Image (cartoon, rainbow, N blue to C red):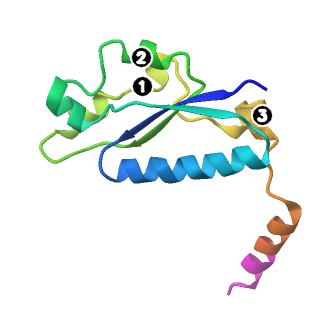
Amino acid sequence: MAPRHIAVIPGDGIGVEVTAAARAVLDAVAARHRLDLAYDEFDWSCRRYDHHGAMMPPDGIEVLRPYDAILLGAVGWPGVPDHVSLWGLLIGDPAGLPAVRQPASDPDLRRCREPAASRDARQRRLRRRP
């Protein structure tokens, strides 16, 4: 199976930690379900804005277009207005790119199901709650 290519944009602050944790989860799911994931990380952040005057390069949308999905962390930094950080990384639907991949739309991810024993145990715990 060909690898799924994921563009990773950690962003700022907690975004770096969140994307690292999200990648660990994705890697665990991929290992369990024999998926091949390939990541490329981009430093498009408020720090980049401070140095270059833009959140991403002018050809950023075209750079992202070949990817299967985008993993976007959190953006925002003191001194950079929210409209700059958010609009500067508006990369989803307007560009025709899947910023969030829904499992129902991806045949490989549709195979990923919670094991029955784990699901049954979780349901029993939920039923016991008052």
- Which numbered disc, 1 or 2, marks the residue that appears first in the sequence? 2
Q: Is residue 79 left or right of residue 82?
A: left
Residue that label 1 marks: 91
What is the secondary structure assignment of the residue under circle 1? loop
Which numbered disc, 1 or 3, marks the residue closer to the eye?
3
Residue 61's disc is 2
Looking at the rendered image, the quarter that the C terminus falls into is bottom right
Q: Position of residue 47 (x, y in %)?
A: 22, 37
Viewer-nearest residue: 20 or 77: 20
Residue 126 belongs to the span the image colors magenta: yes
- Which numbered disc, 1 or 3, marks the residue that appears first in the sequence? 1
Residue visible at 52% across and 22% down in the picture: 97
Whether residues under marks 1 and 2 lie with C-beta atoms below 8 angstroms apart, the answer is yes
Which numbered disc, 1 or 2, marks the residue closer to the eye?
2
Per the rendered image, the range of residues in magenta is: 124-130
Residue 108's disc is 3
The residue carrying pointer 1 sits among few (fewer than 14), some (14 to 19) or many (20 or more) residues within 10 Å by Cα, namely: some
C-alpha distance separating marks 1 and 2: 7 Å
| Amino acid type for the residue under numbered disc 1 | Ile
Q: Measured along the vertical axis of the image, is residue 108 above or below residue 30? A: above
